[in-house]
Image (spheres, rainbow, N blue to C red):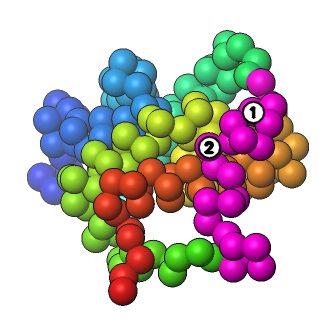
Amino acid sequence: MRDPGIEAPETWLEQHGNALYRFALLRLRDARKAEEVVQDTLVAALQARARYSGDATVRTWLIGILKHKIIDQFRHDAREAPLESAGPSSADADPFAEDDYFDARGHWREKLSEWGNPEDTLARSQMMAILQRCLDALPERLARLFMLREVMEETTDTICQEMEVSETNVWTMLYRARMGLRKCLDHNGIGRARE
């Protein structure tokens, strides 16, 4: 007989499907892939439910499985993605040029943005929609690296292996991703410097 405090697997999709899908979509930026990894997660959870200890909530356990499925998807995409160019050939073509943010002495042109509590900001659906649009505007590899590092909190070594880049390239790409996101978010009225 099942413990009444434990959710029945038949309710997982209804109870946690939307949260899992949003989690996957934010990281993968592709609705079809997000649906697939959520389905794979639920199948894996059904197969492993005997090993679920109950120490964490069902949602936390499912998200842990989902993170592994997302990383598997990143690996799959990396193996099948065509090689991209290293970047713009001239500084004029670089949309994330430092001149937009720093003066001749190397100081910020504007005050740094006051972002408040990131968890509260991300909880608002409008912020999520803008963030998703800004992530979509980044080149795919920059967005993937940003998600691995900043959202999934992967180590630099793991990112180097996943994306097949050097540690120096990770930091360069992460810088470009952050600057691109900052520019996009500022353009959309999120995080503007307070007077």
Tell me if residue 96 is in the magenta stretch: yes
- Which quadrant of the figure contains the N terminus? top left
> Is residue 81 within the magenta segment?
no
Q: Are circles 1 and 2 on residues that touch, CB within 8 Å?
A: yes
Q: Which mark is residue 88?
A: 1
As shown in the figure, which amino acid type bears the numbered disc 2? Pro
Q: Residue at x 56, y 50 (%)?
A: 180
Viewer-proximal residue among 62 and 97: 97
Q: Would residue 190 be visible to someone looking at this image?
A: yes
Whether residue 148 appears in this view of the structure is no
Q: Position of 78 compared to 74: left or right? A: right
Along the line of sight, which residue is nearer the eye, 49 or 78?
Answer: 78
In terms of depth relative to the viewer, which is nearer, 176 or 99? Answer: 99
Side of 73 where 167 appears, left or right: right
Q: Residue at x 61, y 60 (%)?
A: 100
| Magenta stretch, residue numbers | 85-107
Residue at the extreme bottom of the image, as rendered: 195
Query: Looking at the image, which is closer to me, 34 or 47?
Result: 34
> Which amino acid, mark 1?
Pro
Task: First in sequence, mark 1 or 2: give its number.
Answer: 1
Residue 147 percent location from the top left of the image: 54, 47
> Would you identify the image quadrant in which residue 48 lies?
top left
- Check disc 1: other Cα within 10 Å, few if <14, some if 14-19, many if 20+: few
Report the predominant secondary structure element of the magenta stretch: loop
Q: Is residue 145 left or right of residue 190?
A: right
Instruction: Pinpoint residue 56: horizontal percent, then vertical percent.
Output: 37, 60
Give the SS element for disc 1. loop
**Disc 2 on helix, strand or loop?**
loop
Which quadrant of the view contains residue 17? top left
Q: Which residue is mark 2?
A: 95
Q: Is residue 89 above or below residue 189?
A: above
